[in-house]
Image (tube, grey):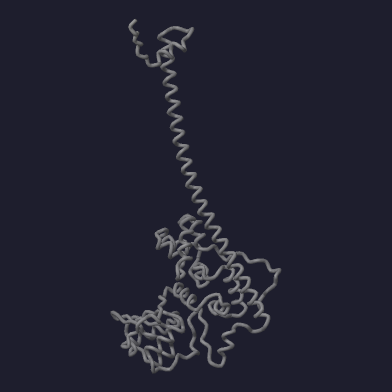
Amino acid sequence: MLATSPSAPASPPRRRLLGDLLVRERLITPEQLAEALDEQAAAESRRPLGEILVDRGALTREALNVVLDKYHKKYRLGDLLVETNTITEAELDGALAYQKQTGLRLGDVLLALNLVTERQMREALCKQLRVPFVDLDALALDPALAGLIPAELAAARRILPIARAEGRLTVAVDDPTDADLVEALEAATGGRVEVVTSTRDALARALARLYPAAPAASAGEAPASGAPAAPAPDDARETQEAPRPDAEVAGGLDALRAGQETLRRERNAALQALRALERRHAEAMRQLAALRAANATLRESHAAAVRAAREYRREYEALLRRTGRREDDFEAVLRQLRPRAAPERRQPG
């Protein structure tokens, strides 16, 4: 059952996010982090923060790997979804707790909770596994490649050959983690096989285009990691509602979704406030630098004035010694120091 006890203490954050770690290690500045976060938010396809910082030149790939190794922060599926702002930390914590209760894979839980779409899930998996994601609907297929893999095998295992060059065959698969399938294809084709993936529906449509006479893909095959299995006709309606074993769980899921939406809004507001504060801090630092420069200029002017005063004092004391007068010495010295005025011309009488 889903735990909904209100008295349970709030769990601490799972870990520092990558951006916080990089600032903490002084590899990037808060301003660079804010700019990278703005770019990440504006991008149509959510990219990991580390990749954005490397592309912007704010961070080297080697430095990024050092931080990841130091904090053991490997790009697991949940981490990627949080780093790309697809889900929040709170949503991931709730999904992980529900995963422990149900035994489902994390991807199945996130999809069932409507926290991610299949495409978002697949793209995160591709980043996690370093496998390319391909939009098969926009890809032109070569009919000559259909002969490389039998239609029955392609439909049963969801394998789509999409390119062949220099002894290397590129195939789109439903499960990019299936190493046995890759080995079997390499043995059958006698060359290297590279895998890509796409959404389940896009893969089915592409298979129908390349193998129009082949039977539809079997729904009983294992799905890719993090993607839910396609429903059989008899239990399609039940699977669409899964996992909802009883009314208590359904109510808990609704409450969890409502709380997660509130947390998402609060998090977005906090991020906007933080970015505004960082911009104000940067402006204050610029003003402080200007004040420091002005202070240095005033100090130099003061030092020059002190040196000039000391020089005048030495001249004054020397004049006193030469004149030997003590009564109106000061006025006499001033007369000596003042430039002499030109003699006045007498007007003719």
* Position of residue 93 measured from the top left corner of the image (x, y, whole percent): 59, 70
Side of 15 relative to 183 (left or right): right
Instruction: Tell me, yes or no, if residue 130 can be seen here.
Output: yes
* Position of residue 46 measured from the top left corner of the image (x, y, whole percent): 46, 69
Side of 25 relative to 89 (left or right): left
Q: In the image, what residue occupies the spot 43% across and 84% down?
A: 203
Q: In the image, what residue occupies the spot 59% across and 84% down?
A: 241
User: Outermost residue toward the right?
Assistant: 7
* Position of residue 156 measured from the top left corner of the image (x, y, whole percent): 44, 90
User: Outermost residue toward the front?
Assistant: 349
**Number of numbered discs:** 0
* Position of residue 308 measured from the top left corner of the image (x, y, whole percent): 42, 24
Instruction: State the residue in front, 338 or 96.
Output: 338
Q: In the image, what residue occupies the spot 47% across and 55% down?
A: 29
Q: In the image, what residue occupies the spot 51% across and 77% down?
A: 117
User: Outermost residue toward the left?
Assistant: 166
Where is the N terminus found, in terms of image quarters?
bottom right
Instruction: Tell me, yes or no, if residue 61 can be seen here.
Output: no
Q: Is residue 124 above or below residue 32?
A: below
Where is the C terminus found, in terms of image quarters?
top left
Instruction: State the residue in front, 96 or 343.
Output: 343
Q: Is residue 43 above or below residue 317?
A: below
The part of the image, by quadrant, that contains residue 274 is bottom right
